């Protein structure tokens, strides 16, 4: 016999509207209005959208290519796959290739 209480499932807010609040060079700021389905309370939320691209690369010895970068948020270095931002209007493949070509292990 299971004496555990049933899990509480949070209600899913309903999106009422959304519009572009600001178009920045590296990201867009969206303003979205949501309504709680049970309490009927409405709230505005701000959402940032970021076009991040990642690429997985292999070295000439078939090893994964990672970059070691200092991250201020964790006050330490981290190993990451190469990534970057791009404009949707531009061809993405040359930017990915250029990002990898700058890495010494990739050449």
Image: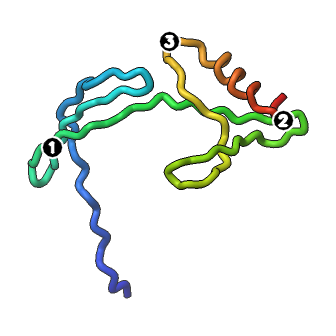
Earlier sequence position, callout 2 versus callout 1: 1
Q: What's the mark number on residue 70?
A: none
Mark 3 residue element: loop
Callouts 1 and 3 close, C-beta under 8 Å: no
Q: Is residue 66 left or right of residue 1?
A: right
- For residue 64, what is the image quadrant? top right
Q: CA distance from mark 3 to mark 2?
A: 29 Å
Q: Quadrant of residue 17?
A: top left
Is 39 placed left or right of 15 in the picture? left
Mark 2: secondary structure: loop
Q: Quadrant of residue 6?
A: bottom left
N-terminal label among 1 and 3: 1
By what rule are the colours in the image chosen? rainbow
Specify whether 19 is left or right of 77: left
Q: Are marks 2 and 1 in contact (CB under 8 Å)?
A: no
Give coordinates of residue 12: x percent, y percent.
25, 50
Label 1 crowding class (10 Å Cα cut-off): few <14, some 14-19, many 20+?
A: few
**Tag 1 residue:** 43
Residue 73 % position (x, y): 49, 51
Residue under the image location 26 percent in, 37 percent down: 46
Q: Which mark is residue 89?
A: 3
Q: Quadrant of the C terminus?
A: top right
Q: Position of residue 2 (x, y in %)?
A: 37, 84
Using a 10 Å C-alpha cutoff, classify the residue at mark 3 as few (fewer than 14 neighbours), some (14 to 19) or many (20 or more).
few
Residue lying farthest to the right in this orientation: 61
Quarter of the figure with the N terminus: bottom left
Q: Which residue is mark 2?
A: 59
Could you give the CA–CA distance between mark 2 and mark 1, rounded to whole angstroms?
49 Å
């Amino acid at each position: 016999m299971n004496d555990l209480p049933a899990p509480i499932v949070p209600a899913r807010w309903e999106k009422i509207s959304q519009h572009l609040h600001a178009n920045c060079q590296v990201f867009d700021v969206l303003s979205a209005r949501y309504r709680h389905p049970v309490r009927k309370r409405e709230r505005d939320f701000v959402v940032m959208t970021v076009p991040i691209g990642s690429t997985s690369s292999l070295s000439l010895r078939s090893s994964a290519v990672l970059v070691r970068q200092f991250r201020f948020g964790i006050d330490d270095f981290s190993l990451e796959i190469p990534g970057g931002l791009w404009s949707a209007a531009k061809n993405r493949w040359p930017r990915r290739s250029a990002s990898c070509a700058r890495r010494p292990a990739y050449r």
